[in-house]
Amino acid sequence: MLVPSKFTRLEESTIFKMKCILADKNEVETVLDVYIRTKDSFYDVSEFIHALDVLYVLGLLNINNKTGLVEYA
């Protein structure tokens, strides 16, 4: 996980980019919808997936296996 440091600016950190996913969230959206909405904030898809993973571990979102929809806490 990229954290702010002497060499990594806050804006480049995973913690900062997680807020892009949580900002302006829609009640019903798929992972692809979330990526399309936030893709300008991430360097590549792996960085986006990493931010999703951290949000999942923190319990701030869940992905429904049956519907594929993102459920926010």
Image (spheres, helix red, strand yellow):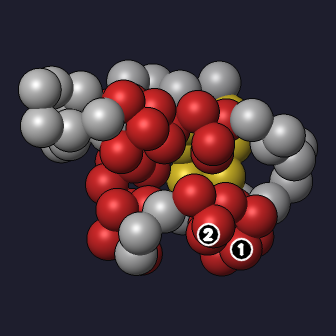
Give the farthest residue toward the left: 6
Measured in 3D between alpha carbons, the distance from the residue under mark 2 to the one under mark 1, in whole angstroms, is: 5 Å
Q: Is residue 63 visible?
A: yes
Q: Which mark is residue 63?
A: none
Q: Is residue 58 left or right of residue 2?
A: right
Residue drawn at (41%, 69%) of the image? 43
Give above or below for 56 relative to 51. above
Give above or below for 30 relative to 53. below
Residue ID for mark 2? 39
Quarter location, residue 36: bottom right
Q: In the rendered picture of this protein, how many numbered marks are placed on residues?
A: 2
Residue drawn at (76%, 64%) of the image? 37
Residue ID for mark 1? 36
Is there CB contact under 8 Å for labels 2 and 1?
A: yes
- Quadrant containing the C terminus is top right
- Quadrant containing the N terminus is top left
Q: Position of residue 58 (x, y in %)?
A: 38, 24
Residue drawn at (24%, 27%) of the image? 4
Q: Position of residue 10 (x, y in %)?
A: 36, 30
Quarter location, residue 31: bottom right
Residue drawn at (34%, 62%) of the image? 47
Report helix, strand or loop for mark 2: helix
Residue type, label 1: Ile
Residue type, label 2: Lys
Structural crowding at the residue carrying mark 1, measured as other residues with C-alpha within 10 Å and reported as few (<14), some (14–19) or many (≥20) = few
Who is closer to the viewer here, 69 or 9?
9
